[in-house]
Image (cartoon, rainbow, N blue to C red):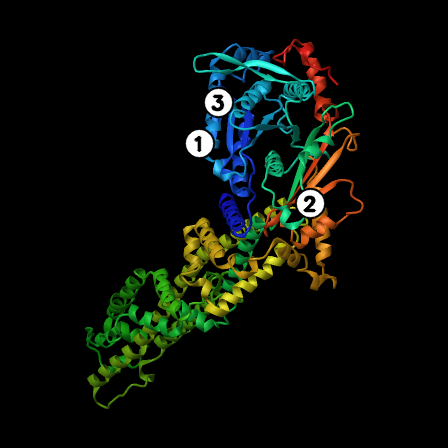
Amino acid sequence: MKPLLHQFATQYAYEEERLSGKSDDLSSFHYPTVFMYVGDKAAEAIEPMMRIHEKKSVNSAGIMYVHITSEDGAKATEIGTDHPSRVSRLVLPVCTERRNDKSLRKHIYHSLTQQTQPWFELNRVLRQVSRHIADYGRIYESFDRIHLSVITRVEDPLNVFIPEVTLLAHSILSQSFKSVQMDLYALISERDQVDTFGYSSSLGVAFLRELDTMQRKDYSFSAPLQVTEDGISIPVTHAASPLFDLAYILSDKNERGISSPGDMQDNYEIICHISLLKNRKQQEATFEMNQNSYNNTSFKNNLMTESGRQGYVSAGISKIKRPNQSIALTVLYHFHQELTHRMQRDLHVNSAEKLMYFGLDPSTLDGLLTSLLPDEGKIDDMSGIMSREMSYSQLKSLSLEDAERALFGEGCQAYFHANFVQEAKLAVDQLDMSTLLHRAMEKQAIQFPQVGFMQLFQWTNPWVEQESILPVIRSLIRQRESEKDFVVSELEQLYQEKVDHQTFKRMPFMDKHNVRSFIRYFFEKVYRKKLERLRLELEIVCMKRAETALEQLHVIYQRQVQQVQELRDALHEAALESIRTADDYIGQNIIEYYERVTQRVMEDLEAKRGQEIFFDDRYMGSISSLLHQGNEAYAQKLMAVCRQHLLSAEPFQQTFEEELLHRANVTVAYENKQVLSKDELFKKLYRTLEEQAGIHIRLLDYTHEHRYEEKYFFGDYPSEFIRFALGADETTRIYKLGCVHEKRSSGVDKLNMMGGFHVEDLMYYRNGKIYYESYMQNEYEFHGVDVHQLPELR
């Protein structure tokens, strides 16, 4: 059930974001963009970032992705199958899984720098990328510059080649573009450092030490990296300057030391947002807000120390949007509950009508018993049974029992047993009471279509007397048993009466006539009474079988009721779990608010199309039949009807601000008289966005000397909330606050960027340095170049 519910909620959220985004303006990259992923683990970022760009950028089809991996990484992951022209992969002839190699990074570096074929292949791949970008030239505003973003995990051994692959890419792309702007995104996954924390941390510190070298203002580099098809190597040179325009360090822990709920996914979102911030078609001029736009040069200058040392950058992101997944699951739960309430409603049916529904009313039972009993005319045929010659004078002093024995011996009883009792027993043995009940129910279902398994569960409940007909059946059984006992008593008393005391017609001096008259009277009086006893016995048997059949039916209905309860619990738990994953404020009152919304939408549909519309075949149809097929069949039908007829209704077509404001005030009438105003709502949204956009790196000191911050909203600039947010704290804020205009009604994002820190400020670096130094002392080698060429450990 969980995967099914997750798929339903995810699909709804995806479709809603597409629908709500139909009138939204997607952002557009101004210059061509290439993302280069270095290392096996970096592959995890490719598909998520492609999906983010496709969702946010109108010209995402022109973004190119390059993955440089090892043979081990190539075996472990398959990427780019859906976009072969946009995703290129270079597999280097090295293995990164040799954990026992104390010089793994060094060996990989020396192995590849002594070969030409891998560099020729990288030349070829990068030239193909450049050619593919040219094919998409028409979708970019300018072809003067290209943005190259290099992404790696700090502990990945392949980032030992970052200078080489970056400068080779720069060299080749420079042949097609006037300038190449290069950024580095170094990702830290502290969550993964469980089993190999010492070694992994050492690898990470080794790379950060190398990065510190690459970002020095006097950093220079030269190597024969361009390789022609004839194997001729051409040097690539980098003059003294930092290798990257800006270097971003992003961890899966924020500056408060709290792990990100989205793990690395949030970092991928951050990279995509920063890329758009730095390289997007400007729309702000329309709204006279250029003073709030991002300026890369200004930002970069604010990160530099007086000595010229460039600071690193980190960032945090937060989003507020309509919690579509939680809404979908909550409405699905309430829809199920509302259907259950309708199925449980009291139909005000009395016991007589319930008996009729099952075909156990007196009239139907009478017809059944008549069909089971032999023809009563056979009683008259008993007068033909051979009798002994006796005079009336011999009979009149005898009891009826003795008179029967004197006249017929055991003949009458044998006849009655063979022609009545045995035939009736045979007919009863062949009777299938369950089938009779089902036939009666099918017939009555046409007249009482509102009767469902919920009512039948109550009507057949052997433990509850208020609604069940089983106490009525048992009462009738006791009544018939009492009547049978009375008839048996009457028969016993009758058999003891004298012949002469009976009220049949006698004629004087006509002995034979009087004997015949007595015999007719005897059969009519005694055997009619025996037939009455037999009928009562049959009725008792039938009623007892009906009782058993009803109890068996109850088991079936009980299972269906249990299924409904199980589904209720599963849907409720799924809704609550989804709400729990949302922010406390954004997820507030979802259960309460959407209970009312669901009720209103269903009542509107019933008012337009009839009270029983949800049980029509065009909607849910027979709930009992669906449950018989299993919980999954019912859930799938429930989701289809909910998606088509409820979630598409007008109350669900609100902007995120309207929806949140209505939901925030849903319980006001019951709790207090203070209605949440728009300003109060906006203040809470503003604080929520700020709190959740914590920087994705943990520093030793939050307020380090060179800390510089800029914060940007991504949303509809003319919207009330954005205008409120830009004006909030305007006189007291110590950071730059701007807006990236994206016409949208589905939500708003906030990107916080903080820079100016250095590697020695990182808690990750300070903790890992201990391991790094210890491993170095134990003859581990982490660098491709001579360690003495690197700066001293800070």
Q: Earlier in the sequence, mark 3 or mark 1?
A: 1
Q: Position of residue 530 (x, y in %)?
A: 33, 72
* Residue mark closest to the camera, 1 vs 2: 1
Q: Is residue 57 above or below residue 744?
A: above
User: What residue did someone put label 1 on?
Assistant: 85
Q: Work out whether residue 548 can be spotted.
A: yes
Estimate how packed mark 2 is, as few (under 14), some (14 to 19) or many (20 or more) residues with alpha carbons within 10 Å: many
Provide the residue designation for mark 3.
90
The amino acid sitting under disc 2 is Leu
Q: Quadrant of residue 171?
A: top right
Label 1 neighbourhood size at 10 Å, few (<14), some (14-19), many (20+)? some
Mark 3: few/some/many CA within 10 Å (<14, 14-19, 20+): many
- The answer to whether residue 157 shows anywhere in this view is no
Amino acid type at circle 1 is Ser
Which numbered disc flags the more N-terminal residue, 1 or 2?
Answer: 1
**Label 2 belongs to which residue?**
689
Determine contact: label 3, label 1, CB under 8 Å: no
Kind of residue at badge 3: Leu
Q: Nearer the viewer, residue 429 or 646?
A: 646
Where's residue 299, x and y in %? 70, 34
- Give the CA distance from mark 2 to mark 3: 40 Å
Disc number placed over residue 272 in the picture, else none:
none
Specify whether 758 is left or right of 192. right
Q: Position of residue 609 (x, y in %)?
A: 46, 68
How far from the left and from the top, in percent, is residue 17? Answer: 54, 49
